[in-house]
Amino acid sequence: MNECHFSEEAVHENEVDFVVPFCHRNYFLNDLFGRHRAILAELLVANSRLSFEKGERVKAQFWVDENVALAHADLIEKIDRFCSEYAKTIESVSAVQIVPGGEAIKNDIHIQERMLKVFNAANLDRQSYVIVLGGGAVLDAVGFACTIAHRGLRLIRIPTTTLAQTDSAVGVKNGINLFQKKNWLGAFGVPFAVFNDRQLLTTLSHDDFISGFSEAVKVALLKSPTDFRELQQNAKEIARRNPDAYWPLIVRSAEAHLAHITEGGDPFEMLEARPLDFGHWSAHKLEAMSNFTLSHGHAVAIGVALDTLYSQEVLGLSGDKVEAVLQTLTEIGFSLWHPLLEESGLLFEGLEEFRQHLGGRLTITLLKDIGKPVEVHEIDWQKMRRASEKLRGFATPYAPI
């Protein structure tokens, strides 16, 4: 055998680029646990390495947002019926787990410990499925637990809000809040599948229903003037919850987010820019400043409006485009002014927190035109304050419904 000898001065270096294949599965349907239940069952079974002839079964555990369980009185029964119908190939390893809905689940780190204990008690492994139904906060929190258990359980997201369906459910980020900062603790993880069920949107309050369309407006402003015009034209029908108006826009918003993640070259945010976070530096800070009484969707609407006006100040975005953005958000039903905007010193701390979250230099996405995002690396405080004052003059005060 030849021995390999290195001198004290020798440096041995390996630098290898490699690609890890992922599959991101997204479904848009109506009544997942009713007429479309076979789609979910077939997905669970088709992607297993188990021997069903020998009696082996896929392990699955269901987690449900408490607010969703209360709003859909027959949901738990439907899930139990699904598990019974496919019991020969799918093993429901525990009763359906109910967790707090809304930002509360992301603000209590002890809930994470409970999730991990339940995973462990059910002997879940990396071939097991955790199927979670809920709003974006519940998907984030349960998703984070999945990413750290065995370095990744198979996560299936079933978003139950417009906000989650248009944006967060299709993403690859999971996390919880810590130190009064949004998503300070988190991990990247590609969901095994996402099922967007239109039927689950029917019980949302007006406030929660319109919430997701701030993200739809945001992604359209960044990616598609055509989609923005359609949002503009259908704003009042969205507010009226006309499915012919809102459902195609939810689908296209999710697809635009998916295309950015899968084709944009930076799914795990290794670069300095986060273009899909247009308007989010202030939105995240406003949420924290309000002790999370201001919902994410409504905070994003304010943040998008603010950065649109600032884009006019520093990049010359035309007045008619600015007016179109503000008017569209208003007609959907958003209040674009909140008293916390007056606390500019505290609000502007959100810029440094935004920078720290990604690292490197500050990078903020603005608009040169609709469909033409631009990255900037510094903020003119006077012009940002002027943008805020313009927003105060345009908007009606925030009033939760």
Image: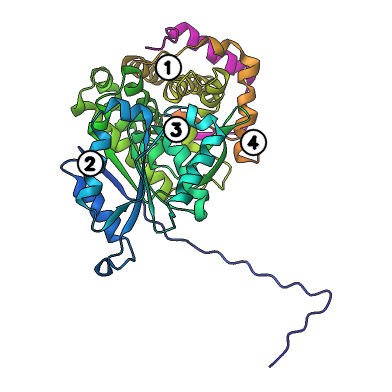
Query: Residue 134: x, y in percent?
Result: 36, 34
Q: Quarter of the image containing the N terminus?
A: bottom right
Residue of label 2: 32
Using the image as rendered, state which of residue 33 and residue 311 is in the foreground: 33
Residues in magenta?
373-401
Residue of label 1: 319
Three-letter code, disc 2: Leu
**In which image quadrant can residue 164 be found?**
top left
Crowding at mark 3 (Cα within 10 Å: few <14, some 14-19, many 20+): many
Q: Residue furthest left?
A: 35
Residue of label 3: 137
Task: Give the colour scheme of this rendering.
Answer: rainbow
- Which one is earlier in the sequence, the residue at label 1 or at label 2? 2
Q: Residue furthest bottom?
A: 1
**In which image quadrant can residue 234 be found?**
top left
Q: Are marks 1 and 4 in contact (CB under 8 Å)?
A: no
Q: CA distance from mark 1 to mark 3?
A: 35 Å
- Which one is earlier in the sequence, the residue at label 3 or at label 2? 2
Q: Are marks 4 and 3 in contact (CB under 8 Å)?
A: no
Crowding at mark 1 (Cα within 10 Å: few <14, some 14-19, many 20+): few
Q: CA distance from mark 4 to mark 2?
A: 40 Å
- Which one is earlier in the sequence, the residue at label 4 or at label 3? 3
Query: Residue 344: x, y in percent?
Result: 62, 15
Of badges 1 and 3, the one in the foreground is: 3
